[in-house]
């Protein structure tokens, strides 16, 4: 959908009506009807409008997302609005996701970095914790921008690059920031996919996921488990995986979930025991979804129940 509020504002400033505009520029009534319905109009018509008003396309119309949460996140991000759902999402998702992976930053310190780009007077915090916190904010912005796009290897690798750039790991040649791992690794004592097989397994995982006609929260949780089982990167897999889940929830208009640090043992158990009991991970993610629903209710943002 498209909003033509900018066009109406320009008309008002000129003291014109839509009917006068059609006569002035020879625009058809059918085009005016499209504008009224919020439909896309032809580029050549937009160009004529821009020339007439002496403005840019963005001054005439804006894309309106049917996902109320995604629309609000984008509006608040672009306008740099503090204290809203975008602000709280950045702080809470970043704090909890980093904390699960061992970050020593508190939620207050995480909030301070987001709000002031400083850490305050506290000492003893590892530099990488600070860098990865700032990087995670940028990764969330990337997710919001790319939310409606199909999930690809390029997007997944870009998230890893955003997250790990500037950390001590990024100066290790074999670490492969933004690329799949070059050395075997384990998670929770369990072996993961060998480096030589990661690319093929990731393509297979994405191909199977893309075949799902109507993606549900259960499908996203399963994808998250399968991604973590592959463990495609040398490090940062948990955070990248949770960012992917956040993106896909936005993409399919599903309320996102944030795994809280206080629930990480349930989360780890759910990932480890998925093959024998999927309910552990599903219940933990749904609990995180309920937490996010409370935020949506507080900020009066509508959402659909699934």
Image (cartoon, helix red, strand yellow):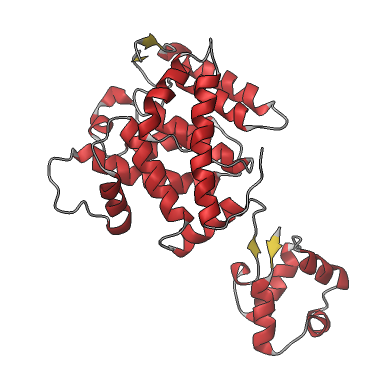
**Whether residue 136 can be seen here:** yes
Say which residue appears at 69% left-offset and 69% top-offset. Answer: 4
Q: Is residue 48 above or below residue 218?
A: below
Say which residue appears at 57% left-offset and 37% top-offset. Answer: 248
Quarter of the image that includes the C terminus: top right
29 displayed left or right of 179: right
Quarter assignment of residue 174: top left
- Tally the numbered discs: 0
Q: Quick one: 268 or 161, which is closer to the camera? A: 268
Quarter of the image that includes the N terminus: bottom right
Q: Is residue 15 above or below residue 39?
A: below
220 displayed left or right of 31: left
At which x and y percent is residue 226?
52, 20
Say which residue appears at 71% left-offset and 74% top-offset. Answer: 48
At which x and y percent is residue 234?
35, 22
13 displayed left or right of 171: right
In the picture as drawn, the residue positioned furthest to the bottom comes out as 15
In the picture as drawn, the residue positioned furthest to the right comes out as 29
Q: Quick one: 136 or 179, which is closer to the camera? A: 136
At which x and y percent is residue 108?
28, 49
At which x and y percent is residue 304?
66, 45
**Whether residue 178 can be seen here:** no
Quarter assignment of residue 135: top left
Q: Is residue 39 above or below residue 138?
A: below
């Amino acid at each position: 959908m498209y909003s033509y509020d900018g066009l109406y504002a320009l008309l008002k400033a000129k003291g014109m009506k839509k009917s006068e505009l059609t006569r002035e520029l020879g625009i058809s009534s059918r085009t005016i009807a499209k504008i009224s319905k919020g439909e896309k109009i032809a580029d050549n018509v937009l160009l004529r409008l821009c020339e007439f008003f002496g403005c840019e396309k963005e001054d005439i119309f804006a894309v309106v997302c049917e996902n109320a949460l995604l629309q609000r996140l984008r509006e608040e991000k672009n306008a740099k609005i503090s204290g809203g759902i975008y602000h709280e999402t950045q702080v809470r998702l970043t704090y909890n996701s980093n904390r699960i992976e061992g970050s020593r930053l508190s939620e207050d310190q995480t909030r301070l970095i987001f709000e002031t780009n400083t850490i305050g007077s506290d000492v003893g915090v590892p530099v990488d914790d600070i860098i990865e916190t700032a990087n995670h904010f940028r990764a969330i912005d990337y997710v919001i921008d790319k939310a409606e796009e199909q999930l690809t290897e390029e997007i997944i690798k870009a998230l890893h690059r955003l997250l790990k750039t500037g950390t001590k790991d990024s100066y290790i040649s074999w670490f492969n920031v933004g690329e799949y791992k070059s050395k075997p690794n384990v998670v929770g004592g369990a072996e993961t996919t060998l480096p030589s097989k990661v690319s093929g397994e990731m393509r297979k995982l994405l191909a199977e996921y893309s075949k799902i006609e109507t993606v549900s929260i259960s499908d996203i949780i399963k994808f998250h488990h399968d991604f973590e089982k592959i463990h495609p990167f040398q490090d940062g897999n948990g955070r990248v995986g949770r960012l992917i889940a956040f993106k896909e929830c936005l993409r399919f208009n599903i309320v996102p979930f944030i795994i809280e640090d206080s629930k990480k043992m349930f989360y780890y158990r759910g990932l480890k025991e998925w093959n024998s009991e999927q309910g552990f991970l599903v219940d933990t993610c749904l609990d995180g979804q309920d937490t996010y629903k409370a935020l949506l209710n507080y900020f009066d943002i509508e959402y659909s129940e699934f």
